Image: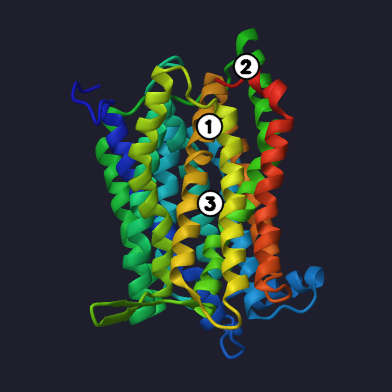
Amino acid sequence: MKSNVFAGHSPGLATLFGAEMWERFSYYGMRALLVLYMVDYLLTPERMDSALGLPALKSALETLSGPLGPQPLASQIYGLYTGLVYLTPILGGLIADRWLGRSWTITLGAGLMVAGHFLMAYEPFFLIALLLIAFGCGAFKPNISTQLGELYARDDPRRDRAYSIFYVGINIGAFLAPLVCGTLGEKFGWHYGFMSAGVGMAVGLAVYLHGRPDLPRAAPRPRAVPTPAERRQFRRAILGIALLFLPSALFWAAFEQQGNTIAIWAEQFTDRSVSLFGWRAEIPVTWFQAFNPLMIFLFTPPLVAFWGGLARRGREPSTLRKLSLGCLGVAASFAVLALAAMLRDGGKASWLWLLLYFCIITLAELHFSPITLSLVSHLAPEGARSALMGAWFTSLFLGNVLAGWIGSFWADFTNVQFFLMVGGLGLAGAIIVEAAGRPLRKMLP
């Protein structure tokens, strides 16, 4: 390992930071366009048959849900795709732990995503492209998160901060993606936006390959026999994941409306005009997808510093309390949108309501997502870290599938009713976290 450091950490953090940043650029660049592309273009009657397997998928979904128009169908496809992104990490974790090792599995996943993003530029391969990206994410995500944890000893106080720094990299990519891919897609053609996402993923693969010498060499362990201590730790990790599984699913079911119904709200019900000293412009719809990641890297340094100051005084919130606050923040963010919908009185709501929504839900995310990644890495034994990280991501699978299903009710509810219903998911998550507090406090840091 080289002697130089990155922000007070090992150089391996810089490699993982850069690779994840570009992977998230590709993922969120495509996500910013996906629902709008389906609703406004691909799922229109004249183009419905252009994608292989799409009519069959529509028929299968309609056997469960009844007739589906473009928006409900797009919502369900979005939920299935984003859900699959978080189900496939189970397979990716097992492949890394038992056969290929983490580095080769990450490389394989990145290659699949490059191919998938470029295939998104060709309508007939739409569903094939989504599958390639989903399985590529499954190989990439749990292993890169686990490699980050392996840079630090279990009792290293920098661990939580490293995950927060890593989360900044995620959100730099997610911030740039809607501005680049979204603008290309909206202004020049959907396929240009999708191809730019593929270029970003190719850069991420190059960054990872260049920095592999700085990363831990975790070999696969196909025949390893767990020690009694590892078995106890494995059972503790499974119990922790089980107790937090439902709150996580509820959190993400609400949070993932950003790429789904929030995009529709921004397009159809938001006054996106900006006027400054006589200059007038309209904010592109996809640019709203950049608000959350922009705020992530604006809010993370002061929040980490704030937690550090509280820690020096022995008052930093516990891991459990951070998770509870994150769920409550989601509820508050959708309460803001419900108020905006109530006050718009048949007109369009100011885009400033969306700005406030993104401020609140970003703080909620910072109290929830990076903390859970650190927690799972902390609990999991050496020989099962990637597999258990994959198991944890199944809570995100359920949350994203729920997000798609819930989003299909957008046209059936008033805006106020819909936002209050989604906000209720966050409130329920906070109640469950607090109710499970006693067993959780025995195992959480």
Q: Position of residue 240 (x, y in %)?
A: 66, 27
SS at circle 3: helix
The structure residue drawn at horizontal position 60% and vertical position 65%, both measured from the top left corner, is 339
Name the amino acid, label 2. Gln
**Is the residue 284 above or below the residue 3 in the image?**
below
The numbered mark at residue 233 is: 2
**Residue 105 in sight in this render:** yes
Q: Position of residue 184 (x, y in %)?
A: 33, 74
The structure residue drawn at horizontal position 34% and vertical position 46%, both measured from the top left corner, is 297
- Do residues under tags 2 and 1 come within 8 Å of each other at their CB atoms? no
**Is the residue 167 above or below the residue 171 in the image?**
above
Separation of marks 2 and 1 at Cα, in angstroms: 14 Å
The numbered mark at residue 386 is: 1
Quadrant where the N terminus is found in the figure: top left
Residue nearest the observer in this picture, 276 or 32: 276
Q: Quadrant of residue 114?
A: bottom left
Q: Quadrant of residue 162?
A: top left
Q: Position of residue 389 (x, y in %)?
A: 56, 34
Please name the residue that numbered disc 3 is placed on: 135
Q: Is residue 444 left or right of residue 420?
A: left
**Residue 84 in sight in this render:** no
